[in-house]
Image (cartoon, grey):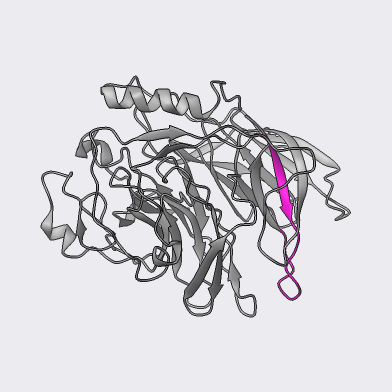
Amino acid sequence: MNRRFLQVAPLPAPCRRRLLVLAGVAALGLAACDDGSKSSDPNTEVGPNPTLPAQKQYLMPPMTVAKVVGWRDGETPAVAQGLKIRALAGGLQHPRSLYVLPNGDILVVESVAPKAPAAKRPKDLIMQWVESLATSGGKIKGSNRITLLRDADGDGVPETRTVFLDHLNSPFGVALVGNDLYVADTDAIVRYPYTQGDTQITAPGTILTPLPGGPIDHHWTKSLLASPDGSLLYVGVGSNSNITENGIEAEKNRAAILEVERATGRWRVYADGLRNPNGLSWEPQTGALWTVVNERDELGPNLVPDYMTSVQDGGFYGWPYSYYGRNLDPRVKPQRPDLVDRALVPDYALGPHVAPWAWPSIPAPPCPTAIAVVPSSGNMAAGTEIFQMDIKWSSSPSATVSPTASPRMW
């Protein structure tokens, strides 16, 4: 799908930095679950103590497909009060993530998913058919590359646009440490030589370490973050299923954040039970690692809340056996009460099926607000409004939500 790149104008000084978001020229259609009930108050589903309603299980979740609506000329997503937004670049091929280099150059990771294995269950065949309707029946074109944008004069219009890296394998995360640029492909972290000001890298990459990949590769995107001293890399690896329907062996070293030694490539599981951790970031006051997590589906339109949380070394966060602490998921058998007993409660619920996948670095004082990119997933109730979240940050997050002026996916 052809997409454009949007620039959000800076917050007032001293928080003067650009916020960058991605938006589709044509909004994605939503394959949505709908059990006939109204959506609950979003304020009860967001926060450190969210309301967790009764579970609802289906042989096949009821689904509707929203109308595919494109963006009109000059139209942009609604943004929070005090921000402005404009298109920075267009004609991108499925942009997935962004990385800003020290000189201000912007790397846009354009990526297509690896080929999925053939569906084995009738339920999976139906879900694939619904997903095809949600994209209006068209094939999503894309390329596995990274594009560089350079706005040398700061007027918001990049004068330079080049293919920075090409022929990658479903890339997502990027991290620069010194003169080493690391790219998290779907199955490996690859290191490339980089000199500030480069507009293209032609040197072959070196594999630092393999990562869990195919043949299933259900959650294939791999987030990447360097430690403050640059000695370690942290990579988010999502699960290979919704709730282990592909077998527990397929989940080895998945639903986890891995810690990788940059010098040797050796790694260990830093924390697990995180179904699909994305948007890794350091909290500047405490130095804690934070992430946003996509939780499981098919327990009803108001379960399970996706969340953001600080991540404890050695911590277990429930998946697949429990959710939001010790709330059991009866679909998973056999259970592991030993793991459930030590399941940690996340710090902050973002609401069910909001599918958070990225946020800028957590702001240090006096900048009070963190902004998470939270597009709706395919399991939110049909007709559910899209809500705007204002996350105030001191030593911990707090937020209220309100309907956006234009409740459309972007």
Residue 168 image offset from top left, x and y in percent: 56, 31
Q: Say left or right for 162 vs 408.
A: right
Q: Which residues are magenta?
A: 3-18
Task: Determine the image quadrant of residue 370.
Answer: bottom right
Task: Determine the image quadrant of residue 360.
Answer: bottom right
Asked if one can make out residue 264 in the rendered structure from this viewpoint, the answer is: no
Magenta stretch: includes residue 12: yes
Q: How many marks?
A: 0
Magenta stretch: includes residue 94: no
Asked if one can make out residue 111 in the rendered structure from this viewpoint, the answer is: yes
Instruction: State the quadrant of the N terminus.
Output: top right
Residue located 65% across and 50% down the image: 21
Instruction: State the quadrant of the C terminus.
Output: top right
Majority secondary structure of magenta residues: loop
User: Please, is residue 114 above or below residue 189 in the view?
Assistant: above
Residue located 63% across and 34% down the image: 69
Front residue of 409/157: it is: 409
Front residue of 105/386: it is: 386
Front residue of 149/200: it is: 149
Residue 200 image offset from top left, x and y in percent: 73, 37
Q: Say left or right for 182 vs 299.
A: right
Residue located 87% across and 54% down the image: 155
Task: Determine the image quadrant of residue 322.
Answer: bottom left
Q: Say left or right for 247 vs 282.
A: left
Front residue of 205/105: it is: 105
Residue 231 image offset from top left, x and y in percent: 49, 60
Residue located 29% across and 61% down the image: 52
Residue 59 image offset from top left, x and y in percent: 23, 33
